[in-house]
Amino acid sequence: MVKAIFFDIDGTLTSFKTHEIPASAFETLRKLKENGYLLFIATGRGKDGLGVLNGFPFDGYITLNGQFCFKNDGTVLYENTISRKDLEILQVEIEKDPVPCGYVMRDTKVFNFRSQLVDDVHAITHNDNHPAGDVSRVLDEKIYQVMIFMDEEREAKLMKKLSNCTSGRWYPTFFDLSPLGGTKVRGMDVFAKEFGFTMEETMALGDGGNDEAMLKHAGTACVMANASDALKAIADYVTEDADHDGIQKAFAHYNMI
C-alpha cells in the first residue's frame, strides 16, 4: 500500500509547453492530500525555484537533485555541498574553453556568463534568469550544484577529474554537477526515516534522466509519456504527459483519487 509519493517538477508536474502545473494536477494533489498520502517534491530546482508550486503544502522537498532536503515547516533534514577542491578544478577547466555555468547556492544562483543557451532553458523553467557576475567568490560559498552547459563528450572528460562529484542531465544542452552523497534517492531515504515509511510504500513520478534512480528506488514507478524509451522500460505504469492530464490519469489508474 502506497503511503508516500515523490514528484519531479519539470516535465512531470509542469508542462513543457505552458511551463505551469495544469489545474487537473493541482486538483489531483488536493485529493491525494485529503486521502491521507504524504506528498514530496523531488527536483533539480533550488529552493528559489519552487514558486511554480503556487504554495501547495507538500510535506517535504528534495531540491537540487537531493543536495538540500527540508520539511514543509522549513526544517532542514539534509544538505551536501561541492568541495572547494572540486570547484577549483572546475574553474580551471572552464577557463580553458568557457561555457556558461550557474553556481547554485541555498537561495540563489550566479552565472559566470549568460548565453542564448541559458535563456532558452529559462524559457522552459522560468527559474534561470539569474545575472552573471564575479564567480571567484563561489570558492568560499556553500555550492550545492553547478548547472554546466556542455556537451556529453566534454562532460565525460570533465567528470574523470571530479571524482567526488556526479552528473545528471535532464535537458540536452546542460547537466547538473552535484557532490557525491546527495541524490533524489538519498532524499527519499531521509524522508522515509523522518516520516516512518518504507520504500515499498512509495510511488515516484518522473520523466528525465535525473529521475531514473528515484524511479528504480520507489516501490511503484510511474513515468510520463514524454520520457525516453529507456525510462519507460523501467516503469510500472506510463501515463500521459502533463498537457494531457498525466498526473490525474496516473492516480485514477491506481484508484488513489
Image (tube, rainbow, N blue to C red):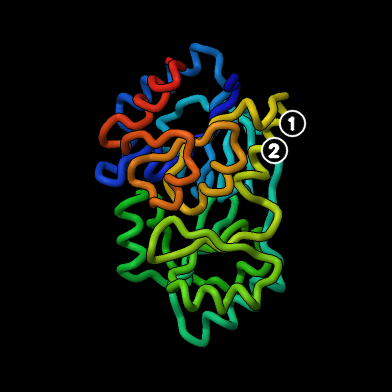
Q: Give the percent coordinates (x, y) of residue 208.
A: 44, 50
Quadrant of the snapshot with the C terminus: top left
Q: Which residue is at the far front?
A: 233
Taking depth in this image into account, of 144 and 189 the one nearest to the observer is 189
User: Which amino acid type is shown beneath numbered disc 1?
Assistant: Lys
**For the residue labelled by badge 1, is the local secondary structure a helix, a strand or a loop?**
helix
Q: Residue at horizontal 40%, vertical 58%?
A: 171
Would you name the residue on which mark 1 appears? 193
Q: Quadrant of the N terminus?
A: top right
Q: Which residue is painted at 67% across and 51% down in the image?
A: 182
Q: Amino acid at mark 2?
A: Asp
Crowd class of label 1 (few under 14; some 14 to 19; many from 20; radius 10 Å):
few
Q: Residues within 10 Å of mark 2 (few under 14, many from 20)?
A: some
Left or right relative to 193: residue 122: left
**Residue 56 x, y percent position in the rendering:** 46, 26
Residue at left 53%, top 59%? Answer: 168
Residue 242 at x, y = what percent? Answer: 32, 36
Q: Which image quadrant for residue 88?
A: bottom right
Residue 79, x across and y down, in percent: 69, 48
Return the mark for residue 189. 2
